[in-house]
Amino acid sequence: MPKSLKGIKCFILDMDGTFYIGDKLIPGALEFLKFLKNTDRRYLFLTNNSSKDRGYYVKKLINMGVSDITEGDVFTSGEATAMYIKKLNKGNRVFLVGTPYLEDELRRFGIDIVEDKPDHVVVGFDTTLTYDKLWKACDYVRNGVNYIATHPDFNCPVEGGYMPDCGAIIAFIKASTGREPFIVGKPYPEIIRSVFERTGLGSDRLAIVGDRLYTDIKTGINAKIASILVLTGETKREDLEASDIQPDYVVDSIGDIISLLG
């Protein structure tokens, strides 16, 4: 029996494939946000993509016509990773395999980005990747430095196909060192704990909306929160029928959630 949406106070929204595709809003997306505001509900955009920071996404969404959005309405796996490192209380020195956006995200939490003697190695979706970064990261990981990754996605969808994502970098490091990281992002528990902390709400007041079964919907299952699959992105009906990961609700697109809420 699907979880009830009656008491939901905040909808956790995936972005690409759920709210927009590339640089185009999915029809009904703005109407859904307006409906949430008019019914005293909230939203939190949640992305595994750690190659950009929340400020980047706020600007992108404003340019698409989303009004009244602030950085507090966006949550990235990079920010969740920074929160996790601070909670560990085991040093703030990080050797980073990541973009300048992720570097800025970590620095905002008082984390030092270093080349030598790190307390942690952090791997994100690094579109500025170099062989020297990989080599140095492997040396540190092999020598036992605490090893963290922002998210597990192997590929990032782009126009015309895919580009290698954080999971592909994790696989490279594992092939060299035999070690796997602690992973923060969807669908793992740490990002769920961070969302609870960020929103101040429990599982019975949250619902997640996304287009991927193995990240978005799996996050809902792991967190025991209501999950809504939209069919505007990666997952098609035939994928759903063949999967053991099942959402509470399935809609054609995000605007159709309004009818679920009555």
Image (cartoon, rainbow, N blue to C red):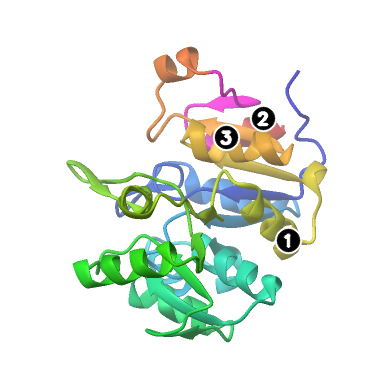
Closer to the chain start, of discs 2 and 1, is: 1
Tell me the number on the disc at residue 199: 1
Q: Position of residue 157 (x, y in %)?
A: 29, 44
Segment colored magenta: 244-255
Distance between the alpha carbons at the discs numbered 1 and 3: 19 Å
Q: Nearer the viewer, mark 1 or mark 3?
A: 3
Instruction: List x then y, in percent, for residue 206.
Output: 73, 46
Q: In the image shown, does 130 or 157 lie closer to the viewer?
A: 130
Mark 2 or mark 3, earlier in chain: 3
Mark 2 is on which residue type? Leu
Amino acid type, residue under disc 1 in the picture? Thr
Is there CB contact under 8 Å for labels 1 and 3?
no
Label 1: element kind: helix
Q: Which residue is mark 2?
A: 260
Dividing the picture into quadrants, the one containing residue 224 is top right
User: Label 3 sits on what residue type?
Assistant: Ile
Image vertical order of residue 29 relative to residue 233, above or below: below
Find numbered disc 3 in the image and state the secondary structure of the residue it sits on: helix
